[in-house]
Image (tube, helix red, strand yellow):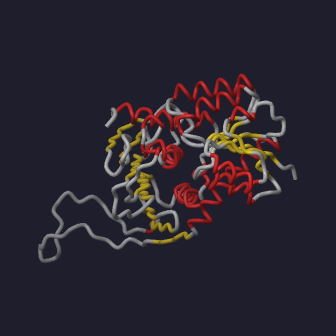
Amino acid sequence: MKQLKIAIIGQGRSGRDIHGSYILSESEKYRVAYVVELIRERREKAEKEYGCPAFADYRELFGKKDIDFVVNAGFSHQHLPVSLDLLDHGFNVLCEKPFAHTAAQVDQLIARRDKTGRMLAVFQQSRFAPYFEQVKNVIASGVLGRIVQIGIEFNGYARRWDWQTLREYGGGSLYNTGPHPVDQALDLLDYRQGNPSVFCKMDRVNTWGDAEDYVKLILSAPERPLIDVEISSCDAYPSFTYNVQGSSGGLKGDMKELKWRWFVPSEAPEQKLLPEPLHDKDWNPLYCREDLPWQEDSWKGSETAVFNEAVAKLYATVYDHLVNKKPLVVTPEQVRQQIWVMEEAHRQNPPL
């Protein structure tokens, strides 16, 4: 089995705890060859953990011939210039989220990829999360009927004061957390003929920075369900991650457990429209009530296991692309729509 040699830019929560941790667990397929990290103590820690050289500046990677791809997991506002520079110097790139901050920037990245002929992949691992795949499977089965609305909530109660609360660093809940639910929402919307209609309301509630930590995002498109995305740091009673409403049933649940119920229309009591007021035999008023033949099913998973599985599946697509010449599953062209939506949401909400 071919082992891919990887350079990781950044040793924060993403670069170390997600990418580095996964690569160490899959040593047959991957090896950390170099690390780039601004903080000296983290560089020294990385050298011990990975057994590789660590640099303070990513440009020290230039000229290295033993790198199959670079993970760009640095500061959010540096994703664009660093990815462009890496492509220009002949590297394949796996870029963390947010991929960019405007659709024009995505176009710039795509053009540079095409010019250099290098791989440009985006780390949208939540698309492969087992809980999300289960939601998609239930919807695709048709048991819920015509889907009317899908609610996606990435909510909780938290106060935050780090660099990701600052707009100058590309912070805020929409660019930090948003790439997960917005990517899923657009995948479910499946509207590629153009861009969806967008309504967005943002607020700054429990943060020491100047960027938003509350987002309400409504997406709609012709002949598609309405999709309601919420990202809130002021929800003390989060109740679900997904809530799907359909003509024959619905689904509700979170990353660890999903439940759905449905009925088969042909097995339901036969009804007909009655324009007259409903009443019983004694002429007492009645309300429409019936016993539907509900069926129910459920899914359970471990939150830790399903997160790791999503990372593994995303990395497998990159491995297959570089080693087996298969097309990427997540492409910059797909992610462009996500970035356009988030750009439009920010346009509707000037700085708070």
Residue at image coords 42%, 59%: 243
For residue 171, say whether it is visible: yes
Residue at image coords 74%, 60%: 25
x, y (%) of residue 257? 51, 68
Where the C terminus falls, by quadrant? top left
Up-down: is 159 above or below 342?
below
Q: Relative to the observer, which residue lies in front, 308 or 76?
A: 76
Q: Relative to the observer, which residue lies in front, 200 or 296?
A: 200
Judged left or right of residue 97, residue 167 is left
Q: Determine which quarter of the picture holds residue 300.
A: bottom right
x, y (%) of residue 72? 64, 40
How many circles with numbers are drawn on the protein?
0
Up-down: is 169 above or below 154?
above
Up-down: is 335 above or below 4?
above
Q: Residue furthest right?
A: 1
Q: Determine which quarter of the picture holds residue 39.
A: top right
Q: Residue furthest left?
A: 283
Up-down: is 212 above or below 350?
below
Residue at image coords 58%, 35%: 79
Residue at image coords 21%, 68%: 287
x, y (%) of residue 29? 81, 53
Q: Relative to the observer, which residue lies in front, 166 or 330?
A: 166
x, y (%) of residue 301? 57, 69
Q: Determine which quarter of the picture holds residue 172.
A: top left
Judged left or right of residue 200, residue 224 is right
For residue 246, say whether it is visible: no
